[in-house]
Amino acid sequence: MAEKKEILLSIQNLSFSFDTQRGVVNAVRDISLDIRKGETLTLVGESGCGKSVTAHAINQLNPMPPGKVDHGKIMFRGTDLLTLKRHEIEKLRGTQISMIFQEPMTALNPVFTVGTQIADVFMTHQHMTKQEAMERTIDLFKLVKIPAPERRVNSYPHQLSGGMRQRAMIAMALASPEPGLMIADEPTTALDVTIQAQILDLLNDLKHKIEMSILLITHDMGVVAEMADRVVVMYAGRKVEEADVFSIFETPRHPYTLGLLNSLPSNTKYKNARRLEAITGTVPDMRTIGAGCPFENRCAYASQKCGQEFPAETVLSESHSVWCHNYHMVKEG
Amino acid sequence: MKSSETMDIPRIKEPTPLQETWYHLKKNKGAMTGLGIITMFVLMAIFAPLVSPRDPLAQQISERLTPMFTNGYIFGTDDLGRDMLSRLIYGARISMTIGVVSVGISLFFGIIIGVTSAYYGGTFDKIVMRLIDIMLAFPYILLTIVIVSLLGPSLTNAMVAIGISQVPRYARVVRASVLAEKESDYVLAEKALGAGNFELMFLTILPNCLSPTIVQATLGVGEAILNSAGLSFLGLGAQPPTPEWGLMIASSKQFITNAWWIVTLPGLAILLAVLGFNLFGDGLRDILDPKMRN
């Protein structure tokens, strides 16, 4: 479990909204989270719950406008990222905060070789010569275990397999002088299971080798179990539960977290064989969410209070908090 | 150099994009014909002093209007006794220059306008595109004539005029493909790596938009040659005694009944050059568009 290490990134009461033609979408509401040095924090939730918006708010990749920070702070190594000027944030991107994307198929520029693209990062941020940059790129390819790195640097993205491309993406994210924080936005969603395991192993491996923090976004509880130190569960733009990885799996206290866990196939094979449960209903329209708990309409434990106000934080233990009025009713299984 | 992992992997040479294009080009007869014609004219232009039998400006009044294949004049002489073959060869030099320079001008401005307009979008895009629309609303030749009459008739000004009046077309083509590319993940990925606006526009997105632009430019060279010939014919381009094809037609048109070759041959040269660029451009379009490929 994570010891109390120095906090690298701290998001404080961040709200982010998009002013669309069909109304204001409050994509992220009042999210706070801390990432410590060398820690992996996973952000879990279903599609459209604001995971990516939260992550993109950190290095300001959300399109603004229509996006807008309503309030909040994002403290990174002592500065509030939201107050930085454009060129200052550009300097941070790719040097201290790097990013891996979901789709390795489309996240590499198709007209350049992967080697050139990574070497470019070295050349712009660290002013290396082309040859130095290429050598460093080959080293990185070795680090991310791409076979035949000397040859692969000269490949175009379409000549590589999905797993290989994702490795190249990771290499690209590592091409920074001081990789502090790596934001991995569903890095394994587009990959098949065996490759997925390899990529996750690789990330874990790298985390220990170069002591970086990972903000991992996923909707796959399997990935969470594999990777996370701590877990933040999001629903409809809200943080609903935060805990260390063991508490999340053993004693989930939010009905939504429980629902997510129940919708996983159990690995106890025939003994406790059961039908997979799905969470009934759909995510509410983000434009019409009221003051209450957004999960109220799908929640088996909902009471009248739930529709009226969003619950305050209940601290269950040092590393476990939940935002639910009826958390005491939620028992596993 | 080789790592242990390299050893047992069979070495397959991956073709570079250029090699791949060349491979498809070789199979396209039209494009190859076009390329052949273009190469011929380009070589003629470069080696004009070596391949032309005589001085294109030297007048030999006693031998004026010599028909083709007589007295050692393969293509005959014009009304001032100048060797037609030499004049046509030197004309290639002028036409190729016009084609390349004017397309270069339109490409330069068209790319800058198209990329920035699509990239920044919003009000800036709207204003720029409406201005481009206004330019497009003028008949092309009228616009060129206006610019030339403002600058004064000369070959250089004709190139500038043709270049400027074609800018809207390139701007539109570039803008359309940038719009399609700028939402791609790799642009966001590059941004996440710290690329600034300039880098994103011209080093990340633009290279992905080159193929339609190259096609447009190739077709544009042919058109520019045709247009400059037209301007010269009207007296707004090259001035005598420059051996410009359009001008050659204009200055000898009264001889069409008794010395057809002085009018016809420059016309054929224009036709051939434009045809070459059009064939090649069409072929390139087929090759560079992945949807048209097998």
Image: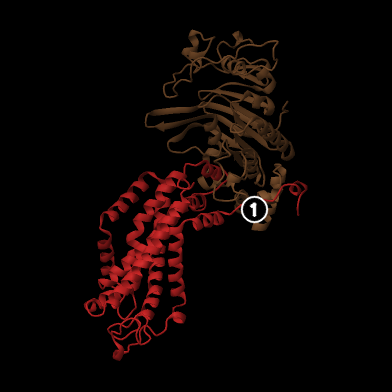
Chain colours: A brown, B red
> Is residue B152 visible to the viewer in this orientation of the structure?
no
Label 1, secondary structure: give it.
loop
> Is residue A24 visible to the viewer in this orientation of the structure?
yes
Residue B117, horizontal then vertical, whole percent: 39, 49
Rendered position, A284 above or below A163: above
Residue A283, horizontal then vertical, whole percent: 48, 20
Q: Which quarter of the rendered picture does the C terminus of chain A lie within? A: top right
Q: Residue at x 34, y 51 (%)?
A: B128
User: Does residue B1 appear to the left or right of B78 in the view shown?
Assistant: right
Rendered position, A220 above or below B18: above
Residue in front for this viewpoint, B174 or A63:
B174
Residue B291, horizontal then vertical, whole percent: 46, 45
Residue A133, horizontal then vertical, whole percent: 66, 54
Q: Residue at x 34, y 55 (%)?
A: B168
Residue farthest toward the bottom in the current orientation of the protein:
B62
Q: Which residue is mark 1?
A: B13
Rendered position, A222 above or below B17: above
User: Does residue A57 appear to the left or right of A242 in the view shown?
Assistant: left
Rendered position, B87 above or below B161: below
For label 1, the crowd category at 10 Å Cα-Cα, with few meaning under 14, some 14 to 19 and many 20 or more, is few
Q: Which quarter of the rendered picture does the N terminus of chain A lie within? A: top right
Amino acid type of disc 1?
Answer: Lys
Q: Chain of mark 1?
A: B
Residue in front for this viewpoint, B101 or B268:
B268
- The image quarter containing residue B193 is top right
Q: Residue at x 66, y 16 (%)?
A: A266
Q: Residue at x 63, y 23 (%)?
A: A221
User: Does residue A148 appear to the left or right of B24 in the view shown?
Assistant: right
Residue farthest toward the front in the current orientation of the protein:
B69
- The image quarter containing residue A9 is top right
